[in-house]
Amino acid sequence: MNQTGIAAVNPSLPTGFLTQGNEKLKERIYSRIRPDLERIEAEIDRHLSSSVPFISTVGRHIMGSGGKRLRPLLMIQSARLCGYQGNHDASLAIVFEFLHASSLLHDDVVDNAEFRRSQPAANVLWGNQGVVLVGDFLYSKSILMTVGYNDIRILQALSDATTNMAEGEVMQLIHADNLEISEGEYLEVITRKTAVLISAACQIGAIFGGGDLEQEKALRTYGHNLGIAFQLIDDTLDYTGDSNELGKPVGNDIQQGKATLPLIYALRNGNPGEKKKVRELFGTEQIRLEHLQEIREWATRSGGIAYARRLASEYVERAKEAIRIFPLHPTKEILLDLADYVIFRRA
Amino acid sequence: MNQTGIAAVNPSLPTGFLTQGNEKLKERIYSRIRPDLERIEAEIDRHLSSSVPFISTVGRHIMGSGGKRLRPLLMIQSARLCGYQGNHDASLAIVFEFLHASSLLHDDVVDNAEFRRSQPAANVLWGNQGVVLVGDFLYSKSILMTVGYNDIRILQALSDATTNMAEGEVMQLIHADNLEISEGEYLEVITRKTAVLISAACQIGAIFGGGDLEQEKALRTYGHNLGIAFQLIDDTLDYTGDSNELGKPVGNDIQQGKATLPLIYALRNGNPGEKKKVRELFGTEQIRLEHLQEIREWATRSGGIAYARRLASEYVERAKEAIRIFPLHPTKEILLDLADYVIFRRA
């Protein structure tokens, strides 16, 4: 199963430990996907033009600022794994980046974000009003682009996903400042807000690539599990990451009253005295920096990070397992590598 | 052409003058559309359920509070005019109410609205965050419902419309506080933000109802012209309307720095001294109530209302002209009545 040679290392080791393996893995992935990435970038640029220049400006800001293009890449690899060999895939692939960008814009408004990817958040630069509306535009545009592919099954999978996502975003908002959120509720939120779109990108890649139902289901499952792992790691990075690498302040989730798995675990298993203190701090208007740091350290010390990383590893294994039905193929290796990379990424 | 017996009355007469004819027309329309309205209401209610109760609550607030259901009604009549006789139309019809509601929610966030239809605006009750996200949900849901009809041409028309609408909303925002907006620019904004969706409702009704291309185009044109007239009158009501009837404060557009046709006309043709004063007041943080009243009266006195109503009447005539290709039919009469009613409505 293991294609990378590094998955055998205990994934609950602290971040930083694996930088070297991480860099090698990253390089190997990049060397294989570079041509796809270039096509994706060109296609995004081409579709960001609008008769309203403000839309292009905000769109370029949110879509040009160092995104990983994970979703379009997954769609393209999935199609190829199912036998697709043409180059008509990029404009469908970028639909997932447009949808992702739209949801980032609305998230930033909802979260009153100040930074994203080392730049001021769009709402800081242009105000909530324009950002909400450009988010709406990117969303509409993504549906319009998908319609151009003339395939109801693709549209069905896509609109199922976006409806699910919107519900997930609302669920997350409802759980704001809720320290009592259970692991199950948390997993449902991250499934909907993140995994569902990644899963749809893979599934739609399979449909577009002419895969059969078994292949479609396999790639959908791969994406689902990868997506959950991706968000689990994202949530640990708020505790262990470096704000320079992340391009946004760490401790952000805590500051916004979002209890993610490291904290949920720590509250379930940590020292009662410290738990009480965290409960008092959490959800106050503005948590002071030293308290933020204390909460981060406490969650790590209580095993919350190790637990979240372990769970993420399990989801990665499930993702890899899901595509076992495909024969060995360079594209399959990319998907396996991407799954491993999700665990080892630092930003 | 004239089916109502009142279109011969000079449409530039002040509102209120036509209350009686207005009421008769309204009654005649309602007596004919009541069964459709009931089906629409039932269908909206059925589709507002969500696994997330907050979504149903906000959805019921925005969609339950006295909407005219103009868009779903137009879709149903258009389908019927093209020969549709089934009852599978209501779930497609309400797509247009969902889209409209989604755009109202985002508008209220963008405008910082306090009231809508005599109730506190959703953003006042639940905050911008939840309202943005529920708007996203209603939008996604409307695409999902449309996909269920399995017709790419319908999806094409719909996503063309929503993309166009989103651009129109951004254009309107860009023109905020712009007193120099030309009549042409203003017409482009209202076409995109209002007419495009009404036009799509009529066109999609035709496609769904099995109309031929000529019928589809006719209904699309009808909806386009009706939509422009509808918004022109909406904009005059901000000057001449009654806040009790409207369910929101009058002078709202002026207060928000939106120059609509009555003001654009008055600035082009009014007394230079008064123009200067209006320019000074317009776009200040908070215009005092007596100044708001002065601007409203000035625009009316300068002929802005009469001009906007005259233009609206022209669009209504174009709308009616567009469906001349259909033989006399009770459904055609409803569409002609609705076109007339657009001019005479007071809220």
Image: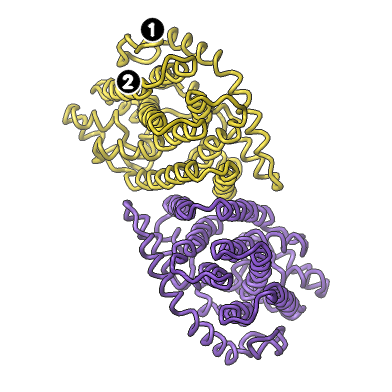
Chain colours: A purple, B yellow
N-term-proximal mark, 2 vs 1: 1
Badge 2 is on which residue? B317
Amino acid identity at mark 1: Gly
Q: Is residue B231 visible?
A: no
Amino acid identity at mark 2: Glu
Q: In what quadrant of the picture does the N terminus of chain A appear?
A: bottom right
Residue plotted at (38% across, 28% down):
B218
Left or right of A160 in this view: B258: left
Q: Within the image, what quadrant is residue A62 found in? A: bottom left
Residue closer to the observer: B41 or A218: A218
Name the residue furthest left: B272
Badge 1 is on which residue? B5
Left or right of A95 in this view: A227: right
Left or right of A111 in this view: A293: right
Q: Is residue B268 above or below residue A314?
A: above
Residue plotted at (61% across, 69% down):
A288
Q: In what quadrant of the picture does the C terminus of chain A appear?
A: bottom right
Position in image of residue A91 (x %, y %): 44, 62
Residue closer to the observer: B162 or A300: B162
Task: State how many labels appear.
Answer: 2
Q: Which SS class for mark 2? A: helix
The disc label shown at residue A3, or none:
none
